[in-house]
Amino acid sequence: MLRSVILAASRSSQVERLVATAPYTRDVVRRFVAGAATDDALRATRVLVDDGLAVTLDHLGEDTVTPEQATATRDEYLRLLKMLAGAGLTPAAEVSVKLSALGQMFDEQLAYDNARAICAAADAAGTTVTLDMEDHTTTDSTLEVLGRLRKDFPSTGAVLQAYLRRTESDCRELAYAGSRVRLCKGAYKEPESVAYQSTRDVDRSYVRCMNILMSGDGYPMLATHDPRMIAIGEDRARWFDRGPERFEFQMLYGIRPEEQARLAGEGYTVRTYVPYGDEWYGYLMRRLAERPANLVFFGRALISKK
C-alpha cells in the first residue's frame, strides 16, 4: 500500500512542487543524488573509486518528448565520458542510459542512434554502457535495441526486473558468455497481469532469476540492498564457483554505504549507481517506493531544523 502511494506521488506535480520548495529538501536530495552538474558527478565518482568501489553514472531525465531534448541528453553523456576518461576514472566508472531519455517514446531509431553514439564514446573512453530498463511497455523495445548495440559493442549491459513475470525467460535468453545483466527488483507500478505484486513473490522471482544468471555463462550484476538477497548472492557465488571477478553487486548512491564498503572489503566488486542532474524528483520517489524505509529518513529531513 505504501509503495503504491509513493509511486502515485511521483506522478503528482503538486507533490513535486511541495517537496521541491520544502525547507531542507536539498540535504535529502544530496544524499541520493550526486548533484546537478557534470563536475558534481565526477567529484562523487572520484570519492567512490578512491574508496575501492566501481561506479555507474546516470544523467537523470526520461520521457523526452522532442529530438532536441534527446540530443541534449546524448551530448551530456558524451561530455561526461570524455571527462571521466580525462580524469582517469575509466574503466572503474561506466554509464547507465535510459532509452526514453534518448527519444524512445517517439522515435526508436533516433534512440538507437543516440545510444550507439554513447556506446562508441564509452568504448573510446575505455568503459561501457548499461541500458536501464523502465516500465514493462518498453521492455521489448529496449531488448531489441540492446541486441542491435551488442553486435558492435558486446559489453553493453542489460537490466532485467525480477517483478515482471517474463523475466525468468529473459534471464535464460541473456545468460550467455560475455553478457552483462543487472538484475533488480523493479521500481515502477505495474499491473498484476505482467508483474508480481507481493514482496514475497518478487523476492522469490529474484532468487529464481539469480540462480539462472549465476549458473549461466554471462556476467551477473546483482542490484539489491536486501540483506537476504545479498547473502543468497554470496551463497550462489560459492555454489556455482564464481570468483569475485565473475559477478558484482550493485547498490544505489546513498543507500547502505557501510554494506557497500563491507562487500568491497571482502573482495567483491561493488558498483554504486550514481545519479546526477536536475530531474531528481521522479528518481527520488521511485527510490522511496523501492525501499519505503527510506521514507523515514526523508520525512525527518523535511521537518528537521538541525
Image (cartoon, rainbow, N blue to C red):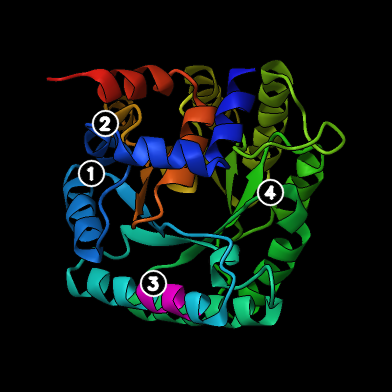
Above-or-below relation of 72 to 28 = below
**Cα distance in 3D space between marks 1 and 4:** 32 Å
Q: Secondary structure at mark 4?
A: loop
| Earlier-in-chain disc, 1 versus 4 | 1
Above-or-below relation of 229 to 48 = above
Tell me the magenta residue range: 71-76
Q: Give the foreground label among 1 and 4.
A: 4
| Earlier-in-chain disc, 4 versus 3 | 3
Q: Give the foreground label among 4 and 3.
A: 4
| Earlier-in-chain disc, 1 versus 2 | 1
Q: Give the foreground label among 2 and 3.
A: 3
The residue that disc 2 covers is: 261
- Name the one closer to the observer, 157 or 291: 291
The residue that disc 1 covers is: 52
| Earlier-in-chain disc, 2 versus 3 | 3
The residue that disc 3 covers is: 77
Q: Position of residue 267 (x, y in %)?
A: 32, 36
Query: Mark 1 is on which residue type?
Result: Gly
The residue that disc 4 covers is: 135
| Earlier-in-chain disc, 2 versus 4 | 4
| Earlier-in-chain disc, 3 versus 1 | 1
Q: How many numbered marks appear? A: 4
Query: Mark 4 is on which residue type?
Result: Asp
Looking at the image, residue 65 sits to the left or right of residue 175; the answer is left
Dot 1 and dot 4 residues touching (CB under 8 Å): no
Looking at the image, residue 13 sits to the left or right of residue 110; the answer is left
Whether residue 255 is visible, yes or no, is: yes
Q: Residue at x 63, y 51 (%)?
A: 134
Task: Choose top left, top right, bottom left or bottom right for residue 109.
Answer: bottom right
Q: Residue at x 53, y 32 (%)?
A: 237
Q: Position of residue 23 (x, y in %)?
A: 23, 31
**Cα distance in 3D space between marks 3 and 1:** 24 Å
